[in-house]
Amino acid sequence: GRGTFVRSATVVAGVRGLTSFTDEMKTLALSAGTRLLEAHRLRADKAIADALEIAVGDPVVQLKRLRLGNGMPIGIQTSHLPATRVPGLYEAAAEVQSLYAWLKEHCDISPVKAKEVYRVGRVEAVDAEVIQLATGTPAFEVERIAYDSRGPFEYALSTMRADRYEIRSTLYV
């Protein structure tokens, strides 16, 4: 007798602890999904080297993944990890659903902190079809450096759909 209710398709991220995308989706009662788009072994350029506190030219593993919530595209995340700290990741990339769970189980890496920067950006042509938006659509650009007890282990750049992901904050004096 109360009618039909449709749950919002927007993922709301508020004050939160340092979690993986998979854990964040669980907290929001959404089914997390990941589809590997690309995996590469490459040499760190200056930006990646600075973020990971490694030398320019050091080997890194790069994973570009589509992140899904209840089967719907929410964002595209490109993670860079120092190859020496993540043996076997490149080979296992297609099977990894939760990167942080895999890192804990296989590499004894557990995040203790992260620095994130959010910017307003636009969906690039190369990602538009995969994220199911028109090129140039406004989106959040998220830059994250994640640390464990030994230092930075992940430098991630994400494009999050602004129509399916929002950030809410409570500010205090």
Image: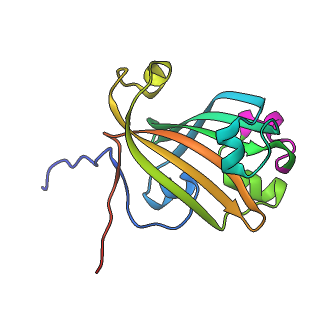
Residue 60, picture quadrant: top right
- Assign the N terminus to one quadrant of the image: bottom left
- Asked if one can make out residue 55 in the rendered structure from this viewpoint, the answer is yes
Which residue does the image show at 33% across and 40% down from the upper left?
162
Residue 134 image offset from top left, x and y in percent: 35, 21
Q: Is residue 77 left or right of residue 165?
A: right
Which residue does the image show at 42% across and 58% down from the upper left?
28
- Assign the C terminus to one quadrant of the image: bottom left
Which residue does the image show at 78% across and 48% down from the upper left?
54
**Colour scheme of this structure image?**
rainbow
In the image shown, does 96 or 55 lie closer to the viewer? 55
Q: What residue occupies the far bottom of the structure in this picture? A: 173
Does the magenta-highlighted stretch encompass residue 92? yes
Which region of the structure is painted magenta?
85-95
Residue 88, picture quadrant: top right
Does the magenta-highlighted stretch encompass residue 53? no
In the image shown, does 138 or 44 lie closer to the viewer? 44
- Asked if one can make out residue 98 in the rendered structure from this viewpoint, the answer is no
Residue 42 image offset from top left, x and y in percent: 77, 30
How many circles with numbers are drawn on the protein? 0
Q: Is residue 109 left or right of residue 20?
A: right
Residue 32 image offset from top left, x and y in percent: 53, 46
Residue 119, picture quadrant: top left
- Is 29 placed above or below 173 here? above
- Is 10 placed above or below 71 here? below
Per the picture, the main secondary structure of the magenta-coloured stretch is: helix
Residue 99 image offset from top left, x and y in percent: 68, 48
Q: Is residue 76 left or right of residue 98?
A: left
